[in-house]
Image (cartoon, rainbow, N blue to C red):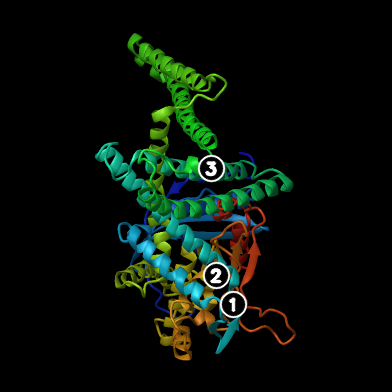
Amino acid sequence: MEPGDSQGPTHNFLVEPPQRTGRKTGDAPRADGARGPSAVLVVHGVGQQTKLETLDTLVRGLVRTILPAPLDQPRARLAQLAGERLNRVELQFKREGRDSEVHLYEAYWASLTEGRVTLRDVVYLLSLAAVNGVRNGTTNFQRWLFGRVVSFPPQIRTVIALIVGLLTLLALVIVNLTIGVVAAARGGFGTQQGIVGNGLYGDLSTALNLLFVLIALFGTALGIGRFVRKTPNPVRLAAGGLGIVAFAAALAGTIAVGVAIPLLFFLHPQTTAASDLPLLPAVLGIRLVDHFNAFVELATVALVLAAVVVCGVAFLARLVKAWLSPAARDDRSGGTLFIVILFAALLVGLAVEIVGLGVPDQGRPAGAGALGRSAVWMLLIAASLVVRRVIVQYVGDVVAYVQPHTLDRFQVLRDEIKAEVYNRARAIYRAGGELGFTYQRVAIVGHSLGSVVAYDVLNRLIAEDELAGPKSSAYLDVVKRTSILLTFGSPLDKTAFAFGAQRKQTATRYALAATQQPLLQRTDRPEWVNVYSPWDPISGRLDFYDPPTERNGEPHPKAVRNKQDMDARTLFFAHDEYWNDSLIFDTLLDALDPRR
């Protein structure tokens, strides 16, 4: 096994029998507490919808970071901690010459949001948040921090981003509605109906072809950025710049098409032109519009066929490889060979068709005609469904958790998510026996929206300790035993602004909100490290959570330590690239070092 290869040890687990650990009944820590195992609870973000997926990713990253130091065979176990059943991965290794043991747990909550948020909810909540953010973002932003109201400058960049986001959201709603209306009208009622005539249909096709091209270019730029991620810095920066330009063009195109579509619906009945004549060729030039549409429609058909050929060849190669393997000796029949040859002939025919589409016709590119236009609209319908799902699955989770005050059922959902994570975190902190707690060092790790949930849960645990008092059997000594709160890809600054901008803030509200957030009141709070990337639009530095600076102007020792991940440098994909880099894993292992 090569150094840095995590495949070997993570694929050779020892599956251990279940283990039961009761709740702690004594107040004194174990005599060997400094040498006992550490615990890590990871809270996933949006998009990680499969149970244990985040735990698997965490294990792989830690193993990759630990190697080539000695690492024992990882162990998987079902553990019962203080009445809660948790899946656990145990790692034993040497780090800087010292034996260490880490128990890894996952808090999974994605299933709670399934079917709870609709597209209408997302559009409404995003619109409300954007409007309130724009209205309140031009004034000083205030928060109650460590016993006083702290005023921050107006968040001008946030306001601009909210305006662009609101316009883009409205444009996407218009585009999706248009695709649905046209598909229903032209497909359900036929091309001769008067709802969407041939002229309007042609203009809408031209507008959406433009949007289709811009989005395709943006996707291509993202793919290039992903492909050159491991190349030298100048190449990566050039790819990043290309992605930013393509993204800006896609945003501008989306907004422009969103404005153009209502105008086209309005202008067509107002003109004296025949209903089957489009208007855009008269404005932009017939030759330009016709050549543009012909190019897009032809390219779409060719790309679809090319994708079919590539996927077919890949599948055919796997099929032939499996057919030739010794294990498939009994399946080698003449019928199977005939099917393989027929499939290969079909792929060759499709390849010839792709080449034939590009044959010039009297010096001009051959158009794909009705087939090409239908192919574009079919792809647009598919893209509309994908966008709808992405908005509901990803953005919906965020807005439902961040704005529970808007709809009562979202307050219930938020409480359920927090309770799911809280129960697991509390069980980890309570685990122990007569000699004391099992874990003297606990790390809370949150990615993306999971960082917001982790922040809320850690606040609740600390607040319960403050209410119980050190002499109570319910006291868990959370502040002292929490080695680190590690957030990455975190929108916590953005959610803080979103909360504060939703309504008029008063000193009463500031103070009451602070009572539920000991992390904003205690200067002895656990270490907090936030990893971010400027290429990740969801994350950013956390500046709204720090104690006052020292008298000499230095940051407070318990201020959030913001670390930029220099290797997460692919636009948008940077939000998940933290998992592929070593920064978060090195930070986590350093925080759990028993010598600290």
Reply above or below: 373 against 315.
below
Pointer 1 and pointer 2: residues touching (CB < 8 Å)?
Answer: yes
Amino acid at dot 2: Val
Tell me which numbered mark, 1 or 2, is placed earlier along the sequence.
Answer: 1
On residue 174, the disc is none
Mark 3: which secondary structure? helix
Mark 2: which secondary structure? helix
Amino acid at dot 1: Pro
Residue 366, image x, y percentages: 50, 24
Of badges 2 and 3, nearer the viewer stands: 3
Can residue 21 be seen here? The reply is no
Residue 528, image x, y percentages: 58, 71
Reading the image, the residue beneath label 2 is 159
Please state the total of marks drawn on the protein image: 3
Which quarter of the image is occupied by the C terminus?
bottom right
Left or right, 531 with respect to 201, comes to right
Q: Nearer the viewer, residue 442 or 575?
A: 575
Q: Tell me the residue at 48%/61% (across/down).
A: 167
Q: Tell me the residue at 48%/90% (across/down).
A: 507
Left or right, 128 with respect to 569, comes to left
The residues tagged by marks 1 and 2 sit, at their Cα atoms, a distance apart of: 9 Å
Q: Residues within 10 Å of mark 1 (few under 14, many from 20)?
A: some
Q: Nearer the viewer, residue 31 or 74?
A: 74
Q: Tell me the residue at 36%/49% (across/down).
A: 178
Reading the image, the residue beneath label 3 is 284
Tell me which numbered mark, 1 or 3, is placed earlier along the sequence.
Answer: 1
Left or right, 356 with respect to 337, comes to right
Tell me which numbered mark, 2 or 3, is placed earlier along the sequence.
Answer: 2
Reading the image, the residue beneath label 1 is 154
**Quadrant of residue 195 within the rendered picture:** top left
Of badges 1 and 3, nearer the viewer stands: 3
Residue 40, image x, y percentages: 50, 63
